[in-house]
Image (tube, rainbow, N blue to C red):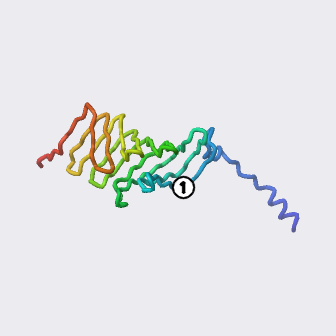
Amino acid sequence: MLVVLMLAGCDEKEPVLAGEAPSVFVEGADQVMVGVENHITRQGVRQAELEADTAYTFEDAGRLDLKQVTLTFFGEAGDTVGVLTGQSAEYQLEAGDVTVRGDVEVDLRTGERFEAPVLAYISASNQIRADSGYVLIYPDGTVDRGTYVVRDLSTDETRYGEGRTTTPEVTVPQ
C-alpha cells in the first residue's frame, strides 16, 4: 500500500513558474523601504508630512526616490493647508525639498486645485512651484493655465509667470 501511494505521488508534475517576481530594488539604491512616513520641519515646527509606498535611499547623493507620494502641508496652527499627491518624487534630505512627478494634484484648503506634470515643494520658503505647466481650478469653476506659478503655503499668495490664461466658468443654457 505504501508503495502505491509513493508511486501515485511521483506522477504529479511540479508546477512551472512563468516569469520572475518583480524586483523592488533599483540599481544603485543603498536601501529599499516600504511604507515610509517623514515629517518635514523648519525650526522645530512641522510644515509637512511626507508619505510614500516605497522609498529608495541613495546615501552618497543625499536623497530618497519615492513612489506613490502624498505630501500634507500644515499651517502655523497645525491645520491642514493642502494635500499633494503624485506618482513619484525625489526628496532632498538636507534641504527638505521635494520634487513630485506624474499626475501631480494639490487640493488646497481654499478649495483651489492645482494640477501639474511636475511640482516642487521648497521647504525653506514653504512654497510650491510649477515651472513646466499647470492648471489651477478655482472653487467657482474658473480655470487658470500657464507655465509658471508659485504658491506661498503660509500666506495663500499666488504669483504667476507670463503666458497665463484664465477661462471663467461658463454656464450653458438648457
**Residue 6 at x, y = what percent?**
84, 62
Residue in the image at 48% along x and 53% along y? 51
The quadrant of the image that shows the N terminus is bottom right
Give above or below for 95 relative to 51.
Answer: above
Give above or below for 49 relative to 169.
Answer: below
The residue sitting at the left extreme is: 173
**Residue 76 at x, y = what percent?**
35, 57
Q: Secondary structure at mark 1?
A: strand
Residue in the image at 24% along x and 40% along y? 144
Foreground residue among 133 and 4: 133
Foreground residue among 1 and 44: 44
Foreground residue among 137 and 45: 45
Residue in the image at 42% along x and 56% along y? 45
Quarter-of-image position of residue 19: top right
Count the labels in the image.
1
> On the rendered structure, is 174 left or right of 107?
left
**Residue 24 at x, y = what percent?**
60, 46
The residue sitting at the bottom extreme is: 1
The residue sitting at the top extreme is: 163
Check disc 1: other Cα within 10 Å, few if <14, some if 14-19, many if 20+: few
Residue in the image at 37% along x and 56% along y? 74
> On the rendered structure, is 58 left or right of 130?
right
Residue at the disc numbered 1: 35
Identify residue type, mark 1. Answer: Gly
> On the rendered structure, is 132 left or right of 90?
left
**Residue 174 at x, y = what percent?**
12, 49
Give above or below for 163 relative to 92.
Answer: above
